[in-house]
Every structure is written in C-alpha cells, then in structure tokens.
Image (cartoon, rainbow, N blue to C red):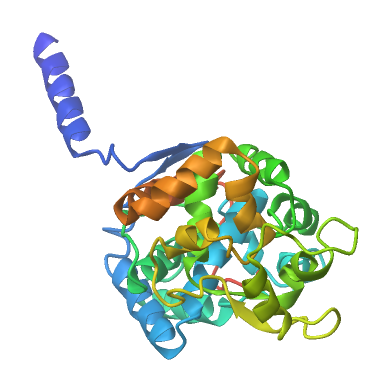
Amino acid sequence: MAQLISVVLALGLVFLAFSPICFCGKTTGGYLYPQFYDRSCPKAREIVHSIVAKAVAKEARMAASLLRLHFHDCFVKGCDASVLLDSTGSIVSEKGSNPNRNSLRGFEVIDEIKSALEKECPQTVSCADIMALSARDSTVLTGGPSWEVPLGRRDARGASLSGSNSNIPAPNNTFQTILTKFKLKGLNVVDLVALSGSHTIGNARCTSFRQRLYNQSGNGKPDYSLQQSFAAQLRTRCPRSGGDQNLFLLDFASPKKFDNSYFKNILASKGLLSSDQVLLTKNEASMELVKKYAESNELFFEQFSKSMVKMGNISPLTGSRGEIRKGCRKINS
C-alpha cells in the first residue's frame, strides 16, 4: 500500500513538472494552455501564422483588423467566436451592431485559416483559438511583442447583438464608461491603457471622431484637447457631413509599425479618437501609464502581452461546452 502511494505521488510530481503552469488561464470547466493542440494538430500554429503573414503582406491594415476582431469577440460573450457567426433563422449576427457594422473586417482571412486547418485536422481547432493566434501573429508581424497564446477555447452556438452594442467601448464614451466596460470583463486600468496601445496600427473612420472636430460637448465647439493644427488638417477630409467612411491613421507617426508612438501622440494632444485622448486628460492613473509607455517601448510591450493573455481568458467555453465549428460563419447542424 505504502509503495502504491509513493508511486502515485511520484506520478503526480512528474505531472506537475510538465504542466504548463505559467500560461494557464483557469476557466469554468477547464484550463487553457499553449500546448493544447500539440498532439491533436501539431501544425496548427504554423498554418495560422503562414496565412496571417500572407494576408498582412498583401495589406498591412489587415494586422489591425485581425487584432480588433479578437477584441470585439472577447468583449461580448467571452472569447468564443460569436462575432464570426452570420445571421440565420435563430441567430442575429453581431456583425450588424453599431461597433461592427461597415467596420469590422478580416473574416475572409479567418475563413481561409479554418479551411486549411480542416484539411489538416478536421474539427479540431476552434475558430475562437484561430482568432487568438491571429491577433498575436498580427502584432508580431508589425514589429510588436510576442507571447504564448493559451489555447483550448471552444466556439459558441449563439451570438449577442445587444451585448455587442452595449459591451464594446465606443470612441466617444467617457473615460469612466470605458473603464467600467473593462472592469466588467475582469480587466483594470493598466489593461485598458496597454490594450488601447493597439491603436498604434490601423485606421479609424471619420464618423468615429467627427464630434471632436465640430461639436464635442453639444455646444457647437471642437474638442480643445485636440491639437488645433492637427484638428484643422483632419477637417479637410472629415467634413461636418458626408465622408463618414473616410479613413484616417490612428497613429500617423508610424502607422504600419507596432510601437509606443501612439502614446507619444497622445502626449502631444494628437490622439485621434476621444477614447485615446481621455487616457491622458481624465484620470491620473491612466495619465501616468501613458507617460510610462511613451517613455519605454519595452515596458509597453511587456504589459501589452500580459493584458492580451488576460483578455484572451475572458469567459471561454471549455470542456464539453460549445463546439468546434466546421466553418466559422455558422454553427454545426
């Protein structure tokens, strides 16, 4: 008996020694860990990376689009690929929500990755995990930090249009509203400032910041926290009416490079969105973080990686919950 106990203990210690402790995210019903597909689909990460790399080489903007797709997914019902579902009889798609309509993109890249993975290892890799890996790869491909992505998420069998409309922070939300939306997902002010740094790449539409140029507080006056010559430049392509879809660089200093210049722009009162500039003007803790990240690219990269892992752990479906979709746009029949 004593011998049996010692064998069991020894096996337990061996298991602990090889358990992926560092990058596990404890979730209801199971763990997420980077090695999840090592046996069931060993080429999964390689396949995702090669298709994301091809897409970003073709269009640099796609990196920001894939990063945003993961963010807009996680903030609704958790990181469960609900954002990818098209409308059907029983499902109202999140693609039609205010934050997503005419702006969320990258769906075709996810489809291409899913198709390649289905050929390699059918019904094994979830759409939710594809998005988490794509977000990391997009960051790395544009010069940003890398991190180990915990894996093992499963896909939702439903979507939430109302959740998409109410849970995703909007460009014109107050600082407090944005912070509350982050806190409701288990994220804090450090995560808010670090993750906002993803605006170092990508574009925003005129409609996302027009109020700053003409009528910030409903009194017919512009937002005076926006540097005035920069505002004048923006007005040339973002008129009072029309031009809603005109695109503007979120980080004019180094638009295709993932770096800390976004924070330097904010310090110069040249954050494009109101939600960017309020990080400096409306809260002391966030102001200090903006200054720190503007000073140190290394510090920003380190925190961005941690916050991305944390965001990727928001309410995933694990174990037997959800499913592994055969195609990312519809649930399995």
Q: Residue most toward the top?
A: 2
Q: Residue most toward the right?
A: 219
Residue 307 location in percent, x, y? Answer: 44, 47
Residue 313 visible in this rendered orientation of the protein: no
Left or right: 169 in relation to 242: left
Residue 264 location in percent, x, y? Answer: 46, 60
Residue 191 visible in this rendered orientation of the protein: yes
In the rendered image of this protein, does residue 73 appear above or below residue 49?
A: above
Figure quadrant of the N terminus: top left
Task: Please identify the quarter of the rendering in which residue 327 is found.
Answer: bottom right
- Count up the numbered dots: 0
Q: Residue most toward the left?
A: 3
Figure quadrant of the C terminus: bottom right
Between residue 80 and residue 52, name the one nearer to us. Answer: 52
Q: Residue at image x 41%, y 54%?
A: 294
Between residue 245 and residue 51, name the one nearer to us. Answer: 245
Residue 89 location in percent, x, y? Answer: 82, 69
In the rendered image of this protein, does residue 139 appear above or below residue 110?
A: above
Q: Residue at image x 63%, y 65%?
A: 227
